[in-house]
Image (cartoon, coloured by chain):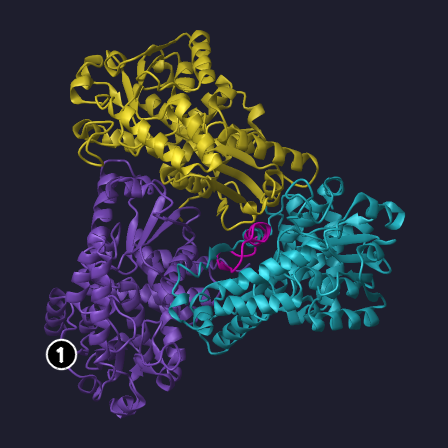
Chain colours: A yellow, B cyan, C purple
Amino acid sequence: MDKTEILKNIESLSKLNTDAMVGNDFLLTWDKSEDEIAATLQTAEILRALRRINTSSRVFETGLAISIFRDQSTRTRFSFTSACNLLGLAIQELDEEKSQVAHGETIRETANMISFLTEVIGIRDDIYIGEGHSYMREVARAVSQGHQEGVLPRRPTLVNLQCDIDHPTQTMSDALHLTHYFGGVGNLKGKKIAMSWAYSPSYGKPLSVPQGIIGLMTRFGMDVVLAHPEGYDLMPEVLEIAQQNSKQFGGTFSQVTSMADAFKDADVVYPKSWAPFSVMEERTRLLQEGDRKGLEALEKRCLEINKTHIDWECTEKLMKTTRQGQALYMHCLPADISGVSCESGEVEASVFERYRVPQYNQAGYKPFIIAAMIFLSKFEKPAEKLSELADQAQPRIY
Amino acid sequence: MDKTEILKNIESLSKLNTDAMVGNDFLLTWDKSEDEIAATLQTAEILRALRRINTSSRVFETGLAISIFRDQSTRTRFSFTSACNLLGLAIQELDEEKSQVAHGETIRETANMISFLTEVIGIRDDIYIGEGHSYMREVARAVSQGHQEGVLPRRPTLVNLQCDIDHPTQTMSDALHLTHYFGGVGNLKGKKIAMSWAYSPSYGKPLSVPQGIIGLMTRFGMDVVLAHPEGYDLMPEVLEIAQQNSKQFGGTFSQVTSMADAFKDADVVYPKSWAPFSVMEERTRLLQEGDRKGLEALEKRCLEINKTHIDWECTEKLMKTTRQGQALYMHCLPADISGVSCESGEVEASVFERYRVPQYNQAGYKPFIIAAMIFLSKFEKPAEKLSELADQAQPRIY
Amino acid sequence: MDKTEILKNIESLSKLNTDAMVGNDFLLTWDKSEDEIAATLQTAEILRALRRINTSSRVFETGLAISIFRDQSTRTRFSFTSACNLLGLAIQELDEEKSQVAHGETIRETANMISFLTEVIGIRDDIYIGEGHSYMREVARAVSQGHQEGVLPRRPTLVNLQCDIDHPTQTMSDALHLTHYFGGVGNLKGKKIAMSWAYSPSYGKPLSVPQGIIGLMTRFGMDVVLAHPEGYDLMPEVLEIAQQNSKQFGGTFSQVTSMADAFKDADVVYPKSWAPFSVMEERTRLLQEGDRKGLEALEKRCLEINKTHIDWECTEKLMKTTRQGQALYMHCLPADISGVSCESGEVEASVFERYRVPQYNQAGYKPFIIAAMIFLSKFEKPAEKLSELADQAQPRIY
């Protein structure tokens, strides 16, 4: 994208209504209006294009961004840091072990204490079903209250870096990837995407990616097919959302019980392991009770059940059954690649390798998606502000 | 505060003598002159006001700030990061476990090795009695020597983020809070503040807050009353300082043995748990000897003694006995709140909740207090520099 | 150095060919041409001088620098952070335990995932013989491929912060120190430097410093003498390089088996402990096999052999045998100082103390050496860019 195209994109962004994003969080994609989803994708594109022509999009002279990782993270951690740095914010991680949070301090108090000069809080909390999203809502309420009470001069924006329900920075990056792949968000309409469970030798992977995918892709009028073995259900409320979206946006949402059915004539396939919702609930209970024996028994039982579905693998053979044998393979990474990172896994090595570069590109959108989420929560007239940045053309590297 | 008021404050700051702060540390409030204390409060106010009108107070284009936390920290950690970021410095934590400090490297050497491009070193070291302050002095001597010897192009400023003796970033924030509350530092004169021990189910809390409070508040001509059960003494040298201050600054300093006596007609109450000085000494010895059995025995014994003072709780009933039943409740946070964070604690839930917002505001001054300490150690003419910042009016958010 | 001298240095830098450094890594000094080595030293000098006259050398408005420490580090960690901050980059550490690297993710994938907005990757990986350098090469290949494939908009520069073979940020700082000491890099020719093994009560220290020293100092036409007890060999391929260099650059390289022989008439002495190459190989194998018993046995055996060489100590008596009894003592720090950090160690306390300030200065060059390595990998015309910085004279502290 050269500068002319950037300005054209800014022009089209200016027509979208993003008023409600200002001062607000990005927790679930289905909380966002169509304009807001479109504006996030477009802003990400513009920020990415500005950086490619060495134009700084630093909008903060100083300011803090806080990350709270309650689970391991590589790409999301670096994406968040990159996004904040791109806008001029410095990262401070809240390491709950080094803090006094363990001391019995309330979430409300901690949320305020870390936010006096803070612009953004990014949270990953995806391990316990029924917990992550609730925790984020509680932090959001706390900083809203703090702001209303005059404790916080500015209300920090929350960005969901993966919870038990949704993984919006991932799925929005996925959507931007699809937009590039199909040459425009309008072209997603009618395309078939297979969100399929796949076998992995590990266990307990979050539901947030498949849930996020069916919750978001149904908004673009895609034909979304969800496939998984019996018992590997997602949260019913998200299925409901996918159903509603498909009606509202003129696509379809259906469920099948084999990968083969899902892959048939698919334009896009997204094979990925996850744990059944009911297991995640049980696991959450056992973790909270500190029942180690119970956890071990559950893991053993689940891995055995898992093994009975070892044939849920994204193979070359299955790929051949997709639209012209050419479906786009997607994964949020890291994938369990058969013969590479495990004996039998989610995907055959040759399929993975063939789509490696597109996948890396898919991941590369994430810093800009996060930056867009922050940007839109901070500026009432984002198009004007981006226009200023483009005009000033302050080099990122001098 | 609008810009006119900011300029008025800068004008009044310009009359204070802060020469001796340049190139110097902030370790104990009683090492500082009246002008220096006043200038720190005023500079914090000005920096806070500048930020509220979106004026950048970034004075460093690049430069490092180092934090060394030898104990857990949330609010001080984030305050320090926020303060440094506000001025343009980047944080690098010295994690002693990841460093070669354990290798037997001397403090003098480490202090120099981390300081080649460093402007500030913030240290929390509050666990061992007789250690924290000494450690800071040793680091201070090391960087002074390094600077004199030409090893360090600039001498980094040390900021005490809590030691065994004082907690100046906390107590100075408390003082700024009181100044706001009573409408000016001059109005503190004659006000009664009750620094009282309170029961907590935990054990071994540092003495630095009560010591810091009696050492600082006696300088404003306040009537400072210290209350604690028998045996819960503070360090004698700090009592001596409070005594001297009270004479010099026209207030009073007295000690009582019940919370009720202390609270009677108080304008401000600060009920907080701490461990007896003699216990802290014994604990320090046992920790250094690695005597785990001894430590357990000590903890058990102390918790039992503690329990005999379970009635030292800041209750609604006691609050009614304060000046017009309206004393300001203060705490450095996190507090042990009865029925919330523990069964029986320092304060009744309804008292805490009623003063929650003021307390959060109290904590909110800390980033600016720390920034002021750094600022005054760096600029020979701080008022001129602040004036420049106000005039340039570089926006913090573009 | 005042501004006139800085400009003179920039002028002389402009005559050196650094074309091949652009977009390239700094892994081994012997991979670099004479011009490149000279340019690195000179750029470090200029950056250091600019900072001393309070001129900012910030060339990045935003951008990330990543550090990967697979071993403990204090001075290199702070040097790397300082260097990156000096140029305007923000640090994000890759903590492999907190990331999904352990998940079986490939190096290629991780390297790309963390590099979307990354300018520099600094790596310390010095524990396993045959591993560190290979790992760096693999990361380098991964980001090159990622850049070629269009995944990475810019190829991050790798800086070797110590591997199993070389420690270029250390030895280049040492070289800059020697240049200052002897009044110009030209004056190093013919000077005798003794790189000698020394006794330490610890075991398993990397070979990278002695190897780096003989590999680099032979390039300045120095008379390099390597001394160690029987069995404490370095990697044969590095001895070969030292030999070749000595021929090519008109110096000498020889090996002796006593510290006394090495010190005789030396201008510079560098006494330092290391583990024998063959032991490091065995240790690497045992570590990889997780053979704890074997490791303990090896350590015990080695410490016993070590003890038979307890007389390899840099004493005052030995120092008297150097050129006019005045040789410069060097160490990469931290040193094992007899009677200070251990009972018997590498150096007598009085020798160490006498050379303490020069050693600290030696360490103080490291941030600028690292900054120079990064700088030269980023700008096609480094002299022009430095000239711009000098002319703009943007203050570092406003």
- Residue shown at the point (30%, 79%) measured from the top left: C346
Whether the magenta-drawn stretch holds residue B68 is answered as yes
Q: Secondary structure at mark 1?
A: strand
The relative height of residue A103 versus residue B190 in the rendered view (above or below) is above
Quarter of the image for the C terminus of chain C: give it.
Answer: bottom right
The residue drawn where x is 43% and y is 33% is: A127
| Residue A109 locus on image (x, y percent) | 63, 42
- The magenta span reads B58-81
Q: Give the total of numbered labels.
A: 1
Query: Farthest residue toward the right?
Result: B324
Is residue A31 positioned above or below C146 on the image? Answer: above
Q: Is residue B6 left or right of residue A30?
A: right
Q: Which residue is mark 1?
A: C255
In magenta stretch: residue C77 = no
Residue C24 % position (x, y): 24, 52
Of residues B294 and C363, the one nearer the viewer is B294
The part of the image, by quadrant, that contains residue B299 is bottom right
Towards the viewer: A233 or B369: A233
Quarter the N terminus of chain C occupies:
bottom left
The amino acid pointed to by label 1 is: Gln
Neighbourhood count class around disc 1 (C-alpha, 10 Å): few under 14, some 14–19, many 20 upward = some
Q: Chain of mark 1?
A: C
Which image quadrant is residue C255 in? bottom left
Residue A64 percent coordinates (x, y)? 53, 45
Residue at image location 46% in from the left, 68% down from the top = C52
